[in-house]
Image (tube, rainbow, N blue to C red):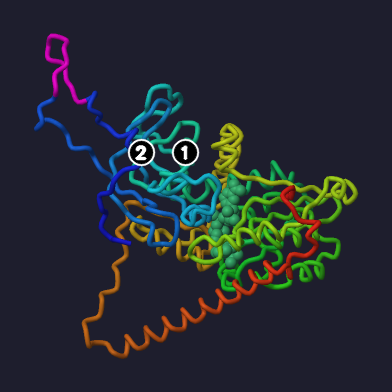
Amino acid sequence: MSEQAETAPTTQEEQKTEAPTEEKDVKENGTGEAEPVAEQEKEAPKEMRAVVLNGFGGLKSVKILKKPEPALNEGEVLIRVKACGLNFQDLMVRQGAIDSPPKCPFILGFECAGEIEQVAEGVEGFAVGDQVVALPEFRAWAELVAVPAKYVFKLPKDISHLDAAAITMNYAVAYILLFEVAGLSKGKSILVHSVGGGVGQAVVQLAKTVPDVTIFGICSKGKHEALKSANSPIDHLLERGSDYVSEIRKVSPDGIDIVLDCLCGEECNKGYSLLKPMGKYILYGSSNVVTGETKSFFSAARSWWQVDKISPLKLFDENRTISGFNLRRLLFQQGGHEFVHKAVQEVFALFQQKKIKPLVDSTWALEDVAEAMQKMHDRKNVGKLILDPSLEPKPKPATPAKGKNKEDKKKQSSEEKKDSEEKKEEEKKEEKKEEQLTNGDSAGDSDSKGKENSS
Ligand SMILES: NC(=O)c1ccc[n+]([C@@H]2O[C@H](COP(=O)([O-])OP(=O)(O)OC[C@H]3O[C@@H](n4cnc5c(N)ncnc54)[C@H](OP(=O)(O)O)[C@@H]3O)[C@@H](O)[C@H]2O)c1
């Protein structure tokens, strides 16, 4: 990715909102008639830095470019962005692994906090100078963003931009999962996948606001120490890839009350099998579809195929509930912004009462977004990743002069070789699994699979 912002062509959508248009490039001549503004008086369109996705795929498709500053449409506010949240969904968007993605190029990002610079007609309750956080559908990772006011939340005085970008999406999702969908109450047990990540940590903190809740958390082994040092109140920390169903049964033979699944695929069946009578399984993500740097149709198909079909009659007999939650659909397709507003207000109140505190993994310059995305891909983030447009990019290592540092080069190339061998090994494993799937080895009973899967 280039370090310097480049100037790029704009999408049709962006051109729509660009100012000035030809019609606007006129001024009154005293007689009430409009006359063209002299060429030299015309202001060049102002530009801003933005993280643009040029095409679905790997990290190379992500560029920092100069784009025209957005102009406001009715009902929108213009936000000067101070901090942005990086979410797992952004990796899936980059790969094109989400439903109805926009056409490339477009500005990435679903979460940003900053200050309002302009308010368009038809907006009530916001003024220039307000400190806010916003959840726009894309375009959040830029110096300026125009957002419909219904997706904007005013910040209480004691919430910084960084805290706002770290809590809004993750804690609102966690709040809705626990208190709206699962109906968490005293004494319940919860299973949380990816417990070391943004949503995972939000779930843990919010769940612990309820007395006697027991949390079983699963994540990569490499995060266990960091989570213990951060005093994350997870009661039973389990390793990703382990036989967690048996491990949980040893501690809790009756199973679990609430299973929160953001992985999908075979985890759906395992999660469902762990439910106690009156237990609730909630699907809210499909991280398992992300395997390599680019989208894999096989892993998406496998993830879908592996999920057992469950009839309502089975749920009736077993006294179990299956639910789903998808913030993007709720906000942008199902008109759920008021519902989300209430959840965000509850989260802000809990933050002010010091009952929750986001765990931030690291903060990055816009120019270093590819590195931040890579960290998430490599499962190395403990907590939230933040982008800060005011940060200077990290200095890049100087390219060693020809003939110099032979030892370093040798070492680097042997490390690269090792990395690529490990990657090849992973890919081979994936291919083997895919082959098995195609041959039906791991598909199980095909009668029990199908589109009607509720989980
Ligand atoms: N339904 C909704 O509205 C909604 C909203 C926000 C987020 N989500 C979902 O919640 C989950 C967590 O989101 P987040 O933004 O907080 O991210 P996050 O947990 O910080 O994401 C990174 C972590 O995900 C885990 N992971 C699982 N599968 C992975 C894979 N295939 N490749 C790389 N990492 C993988 C890794 O941790 P371990 O290796 O430790 O597991 C990684 O460190 C995601 O599934 C996301 O889609 C859903």
Mark number, residue 155: 1
Residue 435 seen in the current view: yes
Q: Residue at x 29, y 61 (%)?
A: 2
For badge 2, the amino acid type reads Gln
Instruction: Tell me if residue 32 is in the magenta stretch.
Output: yes
Q: Nearer the viewer, residue 262 or 163?
A: 262
Residue 355 seen in the current view: no
Quadrant of the rendered structure where residue 29 is? top left
Q: Secondary structure at mark 2?
A: helix
Q: Residue at x 47, y 58 (%)?
A: 385
For badge 1, the amino acid type reads Leu
Q: Residue at x 38, y 36 (%)?
A: 146
Q: Position of residue 223 (x, y in %)?
A: 57, 70
Disc 1 or 2, which lies upstream in sequence? 2
Q: Position of residue 230 (x, y in %)?
A: 56, 65
Q: Nearer the viewer, residue 20 or 347?
A: 20
Q: Nearer the viewer, residue 304 or 405?
A: 304
Range of residues picked out in magenta: 25-36
Q: Residue at x 35, y 88 (%)?
A: 410
**Tag 2: Cα neighbours inside 10 Å, few (<14), some, or many (≥20)?**
few
Residue occupied by mark 2: 12
Q: Position of residue 432 (x, y in %)?
A: 63, 74
